[in-house]
Image (cartoon, helix red, strand yellow):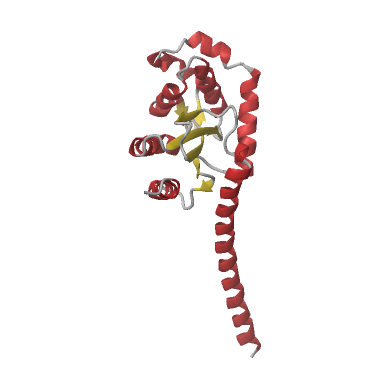
Amino acid sequence: MKRILFAAASLVLIAVFFVAASYYKNQRAAELGFMAQEQASTFVRPHSPTLGSDDAKVYIVKFTDPACETCASFSPFIKQAMEAFPGQIKVVIRYAPFHEGADGAVRILEAARKQGKFWETLQLLYQRQSTWTQHHRVVLDEIWQFLPEVGLDVERVKEDMRDPSIAAIIEQDLADARALGVRKTPGFFVNGKPLEPFGARPLTALIKAEIREKYPE
């Protein structure tokens, strides 16, 4: 009898665990959606680079590491989404430089931004990752050679990337990443809703769901 009771109790505990896990996941999505409205600064800071119309109702927030291969591979999906839904999507870039030395690449991006070349430089870094990353480590000196391809003044980049304000930007973004539970890159949120499960198809589905909700036909 004791064995039967123990087995029954174990099954109940397992069932409770799975129900609780499912409830937590749903609650987390709901909570983050609420935060997108009530605590928007956690997702979008004044310093955050953005792309798209200011009137867009669907915000895609991407926590990225320039040295992250998966971040680079997802870049085309975002571009395709913006082309498919013109004027309805706004992309927000947040930094999560988890790879060794990746903060240096972020500094280069912010310096390029001062020359009006942020998005071109981000795309260039993604395309040339294999030349400036080795064993998940950033080799900063390998980046300078191809920056002129997007019209950057390299010497000015080297000077501007020392700006102390860039360190503050990185620190704030990492703090927000921790607050939102981002532990690896890319970390996506669409209108505050986390991409769970992770993947290209779930991201497309999440974007389309938000488009349907915000732009009902």
Q: Quadrant of the N terminus?
A: bottom right
The correct choice, above or below, for 132 with respect to 69 in the image is above
Q: Residue 25 is drawn in which quadrant?
A: bottom right
The correct choice, above or below, for 213 with respect to 87 in the image is below
**Observer-nearest of 200 and 68:** 200
Which residue does the image show at 57% across and 27% down from the upper left? 103
Residue 112 at least partly seen = yes
Where residue 88 appears, x then y in whole percent? 41, 38
Q: Is residue 160 left or right of residue 120?
A: right
Q: Residue 166 is drawn in which quadrant?
A: top right
Which residue does the image show at 45% across and 26% down from the upper left? 122
Which residue does the image show at 65% across and 19% down from the upper left? 164
**Observer-nearest of 67 and 118:** 118
Number of numbered markers: 0
Which residue does the image show at 54% across and 21% down from the upper left? 110
Q: Is residue 82 left or right of residue 113?
A: left
Where residue 104 appears, x then y in whole percent? 55, 23
Residue 180 at least partly seen = no
Q: Is residue 187 left or right of residue 178?
A: left
The correct choice, above or below, for 202 with respect to 24 in the image is above
Where residue 21 appears, x then y in whole percent? 57, 62
**Name of the residue lying farthest toward the bottom:** 1
Q: Is residue 59 left or right of residue 37?
A: left
Where residue 40 appears, x then y in whole percent? 60, 39
